[in-house]
Image (tube, coloured by chain):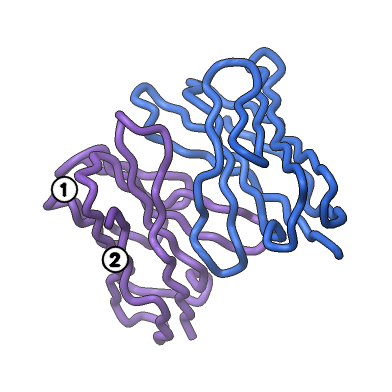
Chain colours: A purple, B blue
Amino acid sequence: EAQVTQNPRYLITVTGKKLTVTCSQNMNHEYMSWYRQDPGLGLRQIYYSMNVEVTDKGDVPEGYKVSRKEKRNFPLILESPSPNQTSLYFCASSSLGQPEAFFGQGTRLTVV
Amino acid sequence: GQNIDQPTEMTATEGAIVQINCTYQTSGFNGLFWYQQHAGEAPTFLSYNVLDGLEEKGRFSSFLSRSKGYSYLLLKELQMKDSASYLCAVREGNYGQNFVFGPGTRLSVLP
């Protein structure tokens, strides 16, 4: 089954404790991206990657890092989480040959 | 810059027709998308327009006018399960790699 898988689905952590949210897709998509979704603000892009070892900042990259060492994986790293990074996070993948983006199930992160 | 506007909330009755509008201002336009999102769940793809005109998929239709920077999503024969947020998104960039999302329209379908 074609899918984008994020882990964990829910996470509560403390300020300053490094964390990684994983994202994996099995569709051989070139393009992957991370979004955060906050009430009233919609989905905002954090980082995106056009292919292995090619990443770039989106609209709200501060406080986040990403890596793309393999085509299928695109982890989101918060080196020192802060409460303003409490949000619902989505990973998405797409291909130049298909118009739409496929989304993971979401990760609800709370930083206290 | 990028700017996508949609109404924040709409209410309609079961069995009725509702039109959700979206206006946008972006650079490097490479397609307009509509996604449905139920609360706390992932967005799911509904429709896609890259050329002007109407695209129909069952109960859902989407229209695009590139010259006006305008699109709408038309939902017919509304069902209770259509209560969700509807996200308008523009794909842009030289390789069409960036999706810029509007704030979403929360639709409530009443019996």
Q: Amino acid at mark 2?
A: Ile
Q: Which quadrant of the figure contains the N terminus of chain B?
A: top right
Pointer 1 or 2: first along the chain = 1
How many marks the image carries: the answer is 2
- Secondary structure beneath disc 1? loop
Chain of the residue displaying label 1? A
Q: Residue furthest left?
A: A69
Residue at the (57%, 26%) spot, across then down:
B26
Residue at the (43%, 60%) spot, across then down:
A90
User: What is the crowding at mark 2: few (fewer than 14 residues within 10 Å), some, or many (at least 20)?
Assistant: some
Q: Which mark is residue A77?
A: 2
On the image, the x and y values in percent for residue A59 come to 47, 45
- Secondary structure beneath disc 2? strand
Which quadrant of the structure image shows residue A77? Answer: bottom left
Q: Which mark is residue B79?
A: none
Q: Amino acid at mark 1?
A: Lys
Label 1: which residue? Answer: A71
